[in-house]
Image (cartoon, rainbow, N blue to C red):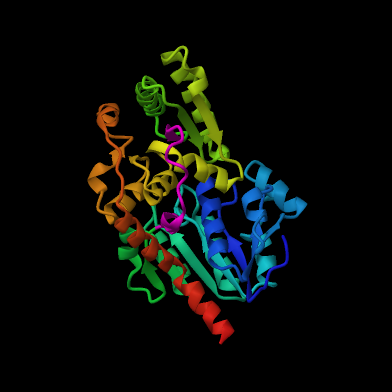
């Protein structure tokens, strides 16, 4: 990281498994506040974040990396405290930002994790901010109260959908704004005269019996597009979660359906280059999006998108922008038929700019804190 003028130092908590959506949020956070030095725990190198002058990537200690990789199999390796690297970074930071999307999810058997997470926040010696989060799903009646305790202790909590906000709007720190990635509406698009592609965002599904039908339906859409002689790009957002495997499987199936078109079907596996991914989306004629942020990126850039929902967070986001009826749920009966008939949604310039301005409110808490430091 090159030297940059620093008004404050922030520790960043986020999902650091090289997920394109989460990396993008941290990238936009750092761009938004160029005079804050962000200390970011990183499991692996990240070209996009390390290129920013105000980001310092911090590699966990060896024992923490061993715990991260093997602790679930060897209980003796498990830490009794959550976020050991962040606890250390907090001692050299002015505040902490937890930025993400599906942060507050209760999985089976995660009660102990969330009790430790609450203790982590209570132990913090610095203010903390929560940005771009949504709530749920939850499994137990006590989980919303635990999350409410985390929110109550925060300096500011910015949720990204109305459904999550309704559950916690009684708490003073909580407000709502569209997803941070909508600020990409201000990003320039590439030359529209260049070849136009169908971009398909893929992911590995956990739903039993749905994965094969899901991939087959996508392959049929791709085959129809290839008939016009235009290329298809299959994007994976998170290799750790199996997206790359799903994209490679889909690529093989498309090539079976369209012999002679092999060179027109390529993959773009995200690893750590946010700008390269944005370039793929900005050149698209149409996006078929499974990943949440694939849909938001397309909407923000003014690219037609067919939104597929694997969870309620996508449905809730689309409801908030007035397009809930256009979402195709992957679990629904007749999914393939709806997908085959679907037309891309595109937002007008005025709506995109409105969403971009509202999305910037995700950063209101940090802006106010920074203004207080400067005054």
Q: Which residue lies furthest to the left in this view?
A: 325
191 vs 115, nearest the viewer: 191
Where in the figure is residue 245, as x and y percent of width and height? 54, 29
Residue 101 versus residue 303 in the image, above or below: below
Q: On the rendered structure, is 142 left or right of 278?
A: left
227 vs 61, nearest the viewer: 227
For the image shown, how many numbered marks are present on the structure?
0
Residue at 71 percent across and 49 percent down: it is 65
Where in the figure is residue 186, as x and y percent of width and height? 43, 57
Residue 54 versus residue 193 in the image, above or below: below
Q: On the rendered structure, is 350 left or right of 282?
A: left
In which quadrant will I find the N terminus?
bottom right
In which quadrant will I find the C terminus?
bottom right
Residue 322 versus residue 281 in the image, above or below: below
Toward which corner of the image does residue 60 lie, by quadrant? bottom right
43 vs 168, nearest the viewer: 43
Task: Let me know if residue 80 appears in the view.
Answer: no
Judge whether residue 31 is colored magenta. no
Q: Which residue lies furthest to the right in this view?
A: 62
Judge whether residue 182 is colored magenta. yes
Where in the figure is residue 90, as x and y percent of width and height? 65, 70
Residue at 58 percent across and 69 percent down: it is 96
Q: On the rendered structure, is 276 left or right of 362?
A: right
Where in the figure is residue 284, as x and y percent of width and height? 42, 37
Residue at 25 percent across and 29 percent down: it is 341
133 vs 197, nearest the viewer: 197
Tell me where the magenta segment starts and ends, as one range: 179-202
Q: Which residue lies furthest to the top in this view?
A: 259
Toward which corner of the image does residue 254 lie, by quadrant? top left
Q: Which residue lies furthest to the front in this view?
A: 193
Residue at 32 percent across and 35 percent down: it is 331
């Amino acid at each position: 990281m090159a030297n940059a003028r620093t008004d404050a130092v922030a520790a960043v908590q986020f999902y650091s498994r090289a997920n394109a959506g989460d990396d993008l949020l941290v990238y936009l956070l750092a761009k938004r506040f160029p005079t804050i030095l962000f200390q970011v725990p990183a499991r692996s190198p990240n070209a996009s974040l390390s290129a920013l002058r105000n980001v310092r990537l911090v590699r966990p200690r060896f024992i923490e990396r061993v715990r991260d990789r093997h602790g679930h199999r060897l209980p003796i390796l498990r830490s009794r405290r959550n976020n050991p690297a962040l606890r250390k970074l907090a001692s050299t930071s002015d505040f902490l930002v937890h930025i993400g999307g599906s942060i507050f999810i209760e999985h089976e058997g995660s009660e102990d994790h969330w009790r430790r997470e609450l203790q982590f926040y209570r132990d913090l010696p610095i203010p903390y901010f929560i940005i771009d989060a949504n709530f749920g799903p939850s499994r137990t009646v006590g989980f919303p109260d635990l999350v409410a305790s985390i929110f109550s202790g925060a300096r500011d909590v910015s949720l990204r959908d109305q459904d999550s906000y309704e559950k916690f709007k009684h708490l003073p720190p909580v407000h709502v704004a569209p997803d941070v990635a909508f600020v990409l509406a201000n990003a320039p698009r590439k030359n529209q005269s260049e070849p136009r592609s169908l971009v398909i965002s893929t992911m590995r599904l956990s739903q039993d019996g749905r994965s094969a039908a899901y991939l087959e339906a996508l392959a049929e859409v791709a085959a129809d597009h290839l008939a016009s002689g235009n290329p298809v790009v299959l994007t994976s957002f998170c290799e750790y979660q199996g997206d790359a495997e799903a994209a490679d499987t889909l690529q093989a199936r498309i090539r079976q359906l369209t012999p002679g078109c092999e060179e027109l079907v390529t993959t773009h596996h995200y690893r750590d280059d946010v700008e390269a991914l944005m370039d793929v989306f900005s050149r698209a004629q149409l996006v078929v999006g499974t990943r949440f942020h694939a849909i938001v990126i397309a909407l923000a850039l003014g690219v037609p998108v067919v939104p597929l929902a694997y969870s309620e967070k996508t449905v809730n986001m689309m409801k908030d922008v007035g397009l809930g009826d256009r979402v195709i749920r992957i679990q629904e009966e007749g999914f393939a038929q709806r997908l085959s008939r679907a037309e891309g949604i595109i937002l007008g310039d005025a709506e995109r700019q409105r969403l971009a301005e509202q999305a910037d409110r995700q950063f209101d808490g940090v802006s106010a804190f920074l203004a207080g430091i400067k005054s």
